[in-house]
Image: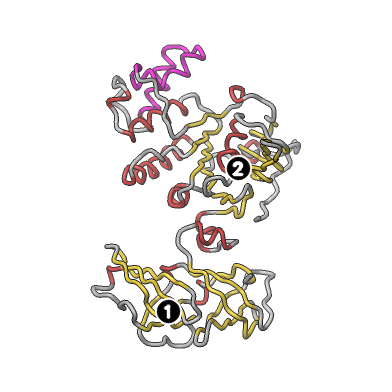
Amino acid sequence: MTETQPAPRRDDPGRSEEAVPAIELAGVRKEYHAYGETVAAVQRVDLTIAQGEFFSLLGPSGCGKTTTMRMIAGFEEPSAGEVYLHGESVTGVPANKRDVNMVFQSYALFPHMSVFENVAFGLRRKGTSKSEVVERVTEMLRIVDLTGREKRRPAELSGGQQQRVALARALVNRPRALLLDEPLGALDLKLRQAMQVELKRIQREVGITFVYVTHDQGEALTMSDRIAVMNDGLVEQLGSPREIYERPASKFVAGFIGTSNLLSGEAVESGGGKATLRHGDGGCISVVLPDGRSVASGETVELTVRPEKMQITAEEPDGGLCRVPGRVSEVVYLGTSTNYNVTTDAGADVVVFVQNAMNAEDVARRDDEVWLSWEPQHSYLIGSAE
């Protein structure tokens, strides 16, 4: 599990309002008891989410991400640990007393109400004046790009428009944080991709903290300021999209975020923050070592290389590049790129993405003997091979 930076002290009287995190989870754990067994849905989570941040909880089904969000919302109480909203503990505080709203995959719009009345519902329940209701609903519909559709019923809207109504309804009450549980899952691929961009735009405009739960790596990478990758109830890595993609902290993260090639090699030389590895009979891989990491001669380690960082050639490349020989096992044309599946001479299965803009013809064919090469800085060490 990746260590997170400690949050500023909640009891520090000199801490500015901007320095107070929107959400903090301190040693949060959630257990369920059934049939005489105890199951930890969330083993231990420590997180600090800044005000105005777009933060994603990313992971496969059953990893604990939705349970973590439900503890923030107040629908679940932690078995251990504390939940803080804007510096105040809300552990034990019911969901309707927490200054957060939640948007689910099912929009739960009122079918008999117009778009305007759906969005205004929460304000009317709170007794907001008629003039303020009109002002705030009108402004929110502008932000979600639904101006002119105020009188329509939900059945008259597309899926994406219904999602925007649900967002407007949640945001019009001006919560200090908005929690979104896989809200785009019911949309088709093209609309989902368009809504990802829209969600980020809306979040920037309203300036509210968004916490987003998803199993879709593309969604998290597209929208997030930071991502917590969860697995088996733990946060495996916490960082920016670029950090998590380029420098995965574990084999799980490397395999879950996008496509990654996992290679192993035996160290034949190490020093000056670098190591040279032997992969099979003809493979030579250079890798930059993370700070504080050393590799002993003869040690077998694992590293990851992203498919788009690799090149594929018929001839052995010049020295200075990492280079591994192999045989092409499959060629898949995808329009914008061609994917080459290559089995190295050490038996590792590797994928190489080649953009078609620069290649009118295939650079290799199935069963061709080829060389894979890449810059040493694109080798990222994960750990010792098991």
Q: Which residue is mark 1?
A: 372
Disc 1 residue type (three-letter):
Leu
Classify residue 199 by image quadrant.
Answer: top left
Q: Earlier in the sequence, mark 2 or mark 1?
A: 2
> Which of the image's four quarters has the C terminus?
bottom right
- Res 160 quadrant in image: top left
| Depicted 133 relative to depicted 106: above or below | above
Name the amino acid, label 2.
Ile
- Tag 2 secondary structure: strand
Range of magenta residues = 112-141
* Magenta stretch: helix, strand or loop mostly: helix
Position of residue 135 measured from the top left corner of the image (x, y, whole percent): 40, 20
Secondary element at image label 1:
strand
Q: Is residue 87 left or right of residue 375?
A: right
Residue 353 in the image: x percent, y percent? 37, 68
Locate residue 96, reporting x and y percent.
59, 22
Quarter of the image where one finds residue 155: top left
Dot 2 corresponds to which residue?
Answer: 49
Which residue occupies 54% across, 54% down? 240
- Indicate whether residue 117 is drawn in magenta: yes
| Residue 224 versus residue 146 in the image, above or below | below
